[in-house]
Amino acid sequence: MSKSSKTIIAMFKKTTTVLMISVGLIALLAWNFPFNDDWKEKVSPTLLEKAKQGGHVDFLVIMIGKADVSDAYTLNTKDEKAWYVFNQLKQTAESSQQNIINFLKEEHAKHKPFYIINSIYVVGDLNLIKTLAERKDVAKIQHNPKGRVEEPIEDSSANSRGPNALEWGIERINADDVWALGYTGQNVVVAGADTGYDWTHPAIQPKYRGWNGTDADHNYNWHDAIHEFSPLGDSMNNCGLNLVVPCDDWGHGTHTMGTMVGLDGDNEIGVAPGAKWIACRNMEDGWGALTTYIECFEWLLAPTDLNDENADPTKAPHVVNNSWYCSEGEGCNSTNWGLLETAVDVLKAAGIVVVVSAGNSGSQGCETVQFSPAIFENSFSIGATKYDSMLMDDIIAGFSSRGAVSVDSSYRMKPEVVAPGRDVRSCIPNGGYSLMSGTSMAGPHAAGVVALIISANPDLAGQVELIEEIIIQTAVAKTTDQECSGVAGTEVPNNTYGYGRIDALAAVQLALSMTSTKTVSTNPFVKTYPNPTTESVTFELQNLDGRNTLEIFDVSGKRLIQKQFEVNGNFSETISLDGMPNGIYFYKITNDENSFDGKLVKN
């Protein structure tokens, strides 16, 4: 070998050694000082800071896949909607979560999957968070914030009451006049998600779906989402954890349920005493968490047995009352509002009316409907009124939160309507009764009206937009001198009263006037699109001949549009809805041989 060749080889060995040392140094530096922090973009800052402190934290892993349940709105019955939504959600969750669940099992990490928002509740450290965030099937990882029961403004244990057995709120909304017509909420199921329920209270025990008068069956009728004591609570609750029998550790839930269905002798406290109830505890010692709220929403969508198995969407309630909130100070903010909002949207798609208390921050002025879930578009948010003996009328309660919703920059009008919410007498644990005030007390009045509407017209079951529209259009208009978010209080709707105070009798009378409320989306001869719509709707007629008449009515039965046209086989016509307010409308197409009708939604 020549001298030059030996020199080249020596230089190569030296260069290779230096290169190997450099690569090793770079690898060491990369291990201790990672350059790729992209995974952190998926993790909420609150959770990241909490995890950096060491130890285990709890969080929600949100998967990439999201089920499309929009077709549920084209289905006719509540059961059809419920099964469709349930199956879509389950299939999406099971297909997208299996690999990550297998991994969590291998890591022996505590976890619980959810299908209602396609997520997994996990307890782990920062390393586990990093590993999960680096997965391509994970969309984001969220903090699990704690929420608070919407505490009453006043709480009196006195049994004081007016001169009549009937409570003032029941009488004010004319619920007793509906009873006189024979409609008390029979064949309707209401639900609550709250601090729990004293199911043995004589005012509500006979109304519990799990009670037959002799024995109790809590399967499909009760669920407890409280599996650990809240660190925010003052003390351990007096009910315990993982309850298989309903219990109320706060008293709030029992009171709200009494306003929905309660009746005990001359204690006529419930709006719909003929309805049955089921429930889920989502708060411990008055405190909940994002996961407990989601768990209850999921169970209400498809109740299970006490082993949390064999889910059955046909056992879901018609309406659920939510007298609670999760504030920004407790960790609910724009980074995770979407999780609860998705759950609310899903329940609505499944045919369940979601009633939510608007909040008790009205003394702070306008734009105080500021907490989830009251701020969401599909939440039917309820403000509170009080009775003014001098005016002999009910007016807005000072504490009742006002709109518009500014925290998400939507400035949507809230509340939708108002209901009696001050000095509301209802049942409390251990057989007692109490006066309480708050929008927590107003919401159950509205939920009870939903039950009365459906008992009067069972075809309305599952028709959430139509039920809400009935309540809105029949509300007693209320005005005020207060202007909020540029909307004068003298206008209707406004951001203080919404469309007004609910009127059960007027709502039921309107519901009774509707002989058919089902959509005809499966009709092979008539199609409408887009539906819902914002400006116009196209009617497409197929395989029809002759002269046809198209009519469009509002929910009161007033004809707004009439048009005639000749059809020879197939035909398409676009109708402008410009100038018509947002809401529910009905159409009817008739010819010499057939008649077709259906529902339109403008929003």
Image: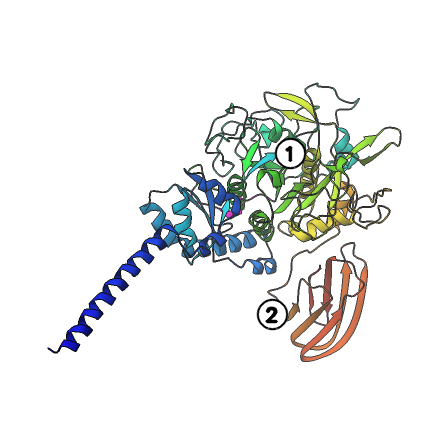
Where residue 482 sits, quadrant-wise, is: top right
| Place of residue 530 in the rendered image (x, y in percent of width and height, measured from the top left) | 66, 67
Residue at 65%, 70% in the rendered image: 526
Tell me if 488 is positioned left or right of 451 in this view: right
Q: Amino acid at mark 1?
A: Glu
Tag count in the figure? 2
In x, y percent, where is residue 567?
71, 78
The residue identified by callout 2 is: 524
Q: Nearer the viewer, residue 365 or 295?
A: 365
Q: Residues within 10 Å of mark 2 (few under 14, many from 20)?
A: few
Q: Position of residue 522 (x, y in %)?
A: 59, 65
| Element marked by disc 2 | loop
- Indicate the amino acid at tag 2: Pro
Which residue is label 1 attached to? 150
As helix, strand or loop, the secondary structure at mark 1 comes to: loop
Give the residue drawn at x 81%, y 43%: 476
Q: Which residue occupies 55% across, 35% down?
A: 288
Res 165 visible: yes
Residue situated in front as seen by the camera: 468 or 53: 53
**How dense is the environment of label 1, judged by Cα within 10 Å: few (below 14), some, or many (20 and up)?**
many
The front one of 136 and 270 is: 136
Horizontal relation, residue 395 to residue 310: left or right: right
Q: Residue furthest bottom?
A: 568
Residue 512 visible to the viewer: no
- Magenta stretch? 309-318
Question: Does the magenta portion include 525?
Answer: no
Which quadrant would residue 10 be assigned to in this image?
bottom left
Q: Residue furthest right?
A: 390
Q: Position of residue 559 (x, y in %)?
A: 81, 61
Outermost residue, left side: 1
* Relative to 320, residue 577 above or below: below
